[in-house]
Image: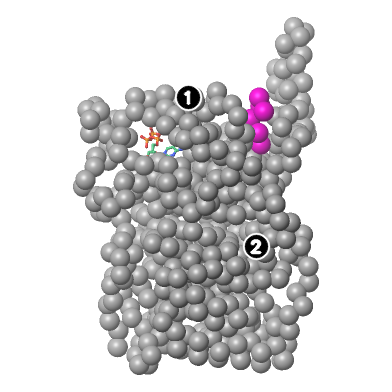
Amino acid sequence: MSQCRPFKANTERALMHRPRRDGAAPACHSSTQTDSMPGQTPRLSKVNLYTLLSLWMELFPSNVDEKKKNTSPVAVKKTGLVVVENMKIIGLHCSSADLHAGQVAVIKHGSRLKDCNLYFSRKPCSTCLKMIVNAGVNRISYWPADPEISLQVELTSNNSTEDAKLDAKAVERLKSNSRAHVCVLLQPLTCCMVQFVEETSIKCDFIQIIEKTVPGFTADTFSKWRQEKMKEFETLFLISNEEHHKQILMTVGLENLCEDPYFNNLRQNMKELVILLSTVASSVPNGQDFGFHCCESQQHKDMHSPSLSQEITRHCMIQARLLAYRTEDHKTGVGAVIWAERISSPHHCDGTGAMYFIGCGYNAFPVGSEYADFPHMDDKQKEREIRKFRYIIHAEQNALTFRCQEIKAEERSMIFVTKCPCDECIPLIKGAGIKQIYSGDVDVGKKKADISYMKYGELQGVEKYTWRLNPSHPSVVQKNELRTVENGGEETKSEDEAQPHSVKKICLENT
Ligand SMILES: Nc1ccn([C@H]2C[C@H](O)[C@@H](COP(=O)(O)OP(=O)(O)OP(=O)(O)O)O2)c(=O)n1
């Protein structure tokens, strides 16, 4: 039996793969979810955004401590977790060397977990589940591949497989006796979403900068990076062998999903989400030469005060890029996420080390408004009165408004925004006490009638990091030397003459 079951909130209609206690087939939504209006660009549903962020959190760059050897008798896989309260993200976590993601959430949020929805990148183990259920969470959604206590044969010995199976049984028992819904929430992506993400990723500020800087960069280069990422992520998040996947689903109590069409649909949905994540991850590539660096006037700081690692900044910017796909502005999607770095307590339980989440947002009309309430036009519309700009809340504004932690003056806090902050947002960011801005800078200095990007350049007292070629790259150093000579009034050569090809060569390895 299959039935349509609308999800609680109308903005969050979900395809719920949840085996029912009466043994019937899981509830199923036959149509594709359409969280976009006709004629609009495709948009990510909240459920899929949270799921993608949970997968991405699993890949949060590990610090040295976390890399220490796992001594558990079972193979425990690192897990990502997103905690959602009243439809707002209040936590982005991942497991550390000592603690699982669910345990981290209990330590961080305690009884505030009551009525929250949790999105795990793997089905949590019984140790975590019993505490989470006990805290009174509303719903626990998990990615239906290998669970936290791995069931993948090649990773486990005979003994540990037995322990893993015992754990899976305990989880089922906890699940059937708890008020919380423990389920798989996945929604098919809106029509053309993957194609849209690919097109917008290649046009995003970061790839545009590479394109302008690197001779010979083409769409094929991006495509190659994307294919490599896809392979890597498929190994991590999917189970290539269908039979193995079915066995895992049976063991974790998802036998209803082993039948077609549910099984095929499930695998298809999972694959598309993994492709989407790989595409977004490729849009801020981790080559050796490009990264987030302090703007020229602040460069001395870049050299002296230790800044965030490129791996972490890139990770956070990709979170912001994912958030941008929930925009309500069908021309320009922007995402923002605020993190801070704890200065006290050297013993961080979180897999994110000293970093902790403060808030996130995307550009959208005021909360609760309906599609037709406000104009959606840009500056091509002659009548200024019916343009979108006076109504839309910017990504940074939403991130600041719905933050779940205070911004502490004594700590280093940073905002990651996919686009340069505009003149409306710069005073807000500075006023909030945010210490660093990581952003795109393609529009810096742009002035339009209703939105401008003039204040960013003059902003003092906040460190500004933009995506560009490493200032210590030979070609940049040589360019600077050339400029010094120019200012000294000596004879200058053309850039091409001055830079032998071997020096200019820029590495674009996407490792
Ligand atoms: N740091 C920023 C910058 C912009 N926005 C949002 C506010 C508007 O929803 C949209 C405005 O983007 P543009 O300045 O790019 O303006 P247009 O959407 O009109 O596009 P165009 O670049 O063609 O002018 O982006 C945001 O949330 N955060």
**Span colored in magenta:** 293-298
Q: Which residue is at a point 74% across and 41% down the rendered structure image?
A: 306
Q: Quadrant of the C terminus?
A: bottom right
Mark 2 closeness class: few <14, some 14–19, many ≥20 residues within 10 Å: many
What residue is shown with label 1? Answer: 454
Name the foreground residue: 181 vs 467.
181
Residue 154: image quadrant is: bottom right
| Callout 2: CB less than 8 Å from ligand 1 | no
Q: Which residue is at a point 70% across and 83% down the rendered structure image?
A: 74
Q: Is residue 188 magenta?
A: no
Position of 31 with respect to 508 (left or right) is: left
What residue is shown with label 2? Answer: 350
Name the foreground residue: 268 vs 455.
455
Q: Is residue 401 visible?
A: yes
Name the foreground residue: 213 vs 136.
136
Position of 211 with respect to 76 (left or right) is: left
Q: In the displayed image of the protein, which residue is found farthest to the top?
A: 489
